[in-house]
Structure formats: C-alpha cells, structure tokens
Amino acid sequence: MIKVIKPGVQLSVQDLGRTGYRHLGVSKTGSLDPYSQIIANRLINNNDNDAVLEITVGLCELTFLCSSVIALHGADLQASIDGEPIYPGWSYNVKANQTMCFNTGRAGLRAYLAVKGGIKTPLIMESRATDLNACFGGLNGNALSAGDILPIDEYINNDFKQTGAITPAKRQIIRVHSSPHSNTLGQEITDTFVNTRFKVSHNSNRMGVRLENAANSLTHTHSLPSTGVSPGSIQLPPNGEPIVLLNDAQTTGGYPLLGTVIEADLHQFAQFRPGDSVKFEYVTIEDAAKAQRKLNGHLEQLKIALKYKR
C-alpha cells in the first residue's frame, strides 16, 4: 500500500487511457506523457499499461506501507526518499515505511511514478485511469487527497539492480497535420499560425493547453457545426487564442481547427509550463509516420538494452 500524506497540486492514478469509447462521449484520459509512463514501467519490468501516479508540479508526499521497486520519469520535481535525492530516468528499491517527497522543478510539469506490478485500483472500461471530469476511474474518480491509500503488491528484491533510461529528445518546433478547416480559416490565418511564437497560458489543464500571443492576430468570426475532436486537435476560438486539446478534452467541438499535433510530439504538451514558448510547423502524413517510427525505435532500443541487462 501507498499512503498519500500530501497530494500537492494534482496527483492522480493514470495508465494509457480508454480507447474505443469516444462514440459514447467518453474521453481518453490517461497519462498526458505516455512515453514517460512506458519508460518508467519498462525500467522495473512492468507492462507498459500498468497504472502509475501522475504528479503535477510536485509538492506532494507519499509513504510506502510495504516494500517495492519503483521508477521515476518525466519532469525533475526534486524527488527524494527519506531525504536522499532520486532522479527521473532511474529505478530504485523502496522499503516499508519509507517516505517519498516531491518539491518542484524549473523545467517540465509532470512526473510519473511506476511501482512494481502497477497501482491496483479497479478497472473501469478496461482502464484504471482517472477521469477527473466524469469522476470515475482511479481511486473513487477523483484526484488523490491526503489520507488516501493506494493498493499495490508488496515486492521485495534483495538482488535489486538499478536501471536507467535516456529521455526521448524534445523538439523546439511542434509538428502539426494540416487542418480540415484550412479553406474556411483562409491562408492568412494558417500562415500567421505557423509564423507566430505562442506562450502557454496559466489557464491550461489536462483538458487542453491554451496559447497566447501578444499580437492577437488570429481572431475570427467563423461558426461551425460540432465535429469530432481528439487529443492533439488545435481549436481556434473567436478570440484568436488556440487550444491544444489533451486527454481529458471533450469528444466534440464547434470551433474551427488549425490542425492536429502529430502523435510523436503531443506528449511534449504534458511538460509545458505556463509562460513556456511554443511554435508550430505543418508536416505531411509521411513526416508524421517517420517521426513516430523514430520514437518507437527509441523505445525498442530501451527494451533490448534492458533485456540484456537483466
């Protein structure tokens, strides 16, 4: 078991989310940075989809009520175990009654904590992910609170060997599929979009990252019937401030779309902090597929390296 002493800004149980239910209005949810979850799980020989803790900003404290092996990935939120620093990208042995604390960091927003065997909250629609809007999944459908007890399996490894992994490279310019509404918006708006450097708004969350630009040059008066949207869709409200939809976003929307962030780059929005700078470029389907193959190759190299290390 893990006891939550302090939850920090937002602490939740997540996995790779729910698929196959969007036609019923069910959001994907799940880890906003799935590659951090996957790498953390692989470092301790878990399944990729084993549930993890998503720690936002930090400032939380957890006590392990049983022994386990853990791995940390994502943002460096200055974590420690009984006062000894630990770092993202590494696995660690944890003993019963040890306490893990997170301070906060200057780069990145979310860290992911994997424990041996995963967090054992109930499966709902084939996932343990917390849907914070619909209030189901995770532990009672909510962000975690002080005093909550998370079920995990006890695991004692007297022959523990620490393993580590390099984080996939981050990009300075986010790649985007072309917009289905480019003719509606017009060439001037789409050109302005890719030539503008945006700042991440404080008014961002797991539903979407809102972007600001001082020139406010993307305002429009277009109104469209609602259409299906998904994580990565970039909505453009009339105020001209784009919204990059994330895992907890609704399944339909009526704002015109500037495009869709390619799958290989979408995970970076989990780590953007308010005030961070974001720029975009349009790419082809072939470019997107090549980028995904490169990212998948990084994960396959990790799998092979860990296999031979063990």
Image (cartoon, helix red, strand yellow):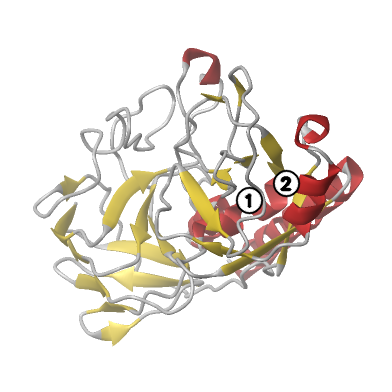
Residue under the image location 56 percent in, 59 percent down: 39
Rounded to the nearest whole Å, what is the CA distance between mark 1 and mark 2?
Answer: 6 Å
Q: Which residue is mark 1?
A: 266
Residue 47 percent location from the top left of the image: 51, 45
**Looking at numbered disc 2 in the image, what kind of residue is underneath it?**
Ile
Quadrant of residue 183 within the rendered picture = top right
Residue under the image location 26 percent in, 77 percent down: 81
- At mark 2, the secondary structure is loop
In the image shown, does 226 or 42 lie closer to the viewer?
A: 226
Quadrant of residue 267 within the rendered picture = bottom right
Quadrant of residue 133 within the rendered picture = top left
Residue under the image location 28 percent in, 76 percent down: 103
The reply to whether dot 1 and dot 2 touch (C-beta < 8 Å) is yes
Q: Is residue 98 visible?
A: yes
In the image shown, does 95 or 181 lie closer to the viewer?
A: 181
* Residue furthest bottom in the image: 84
Residue 205 percent location from the top left of the image: 41, 50
* Residue furthest left in the image: 147
* Residue furthest front in the image: 221
Q: Is residue 32 visible?
A: no
Residue under the image location 46 percent in, 66 percent down: 273
> Is residue 49 shown above or below 98?
above
**Looking at numbered disc 1 in the image, what kind of residue is underneath it?**
Leu
Residue 132 percent location from the top left of the image: 31, 37
Q: Which residue is mark 2?
A: 262
Specify the quadrant that holds the C terminus: bottom right
> Is residue 251 shown above or below 4?
above
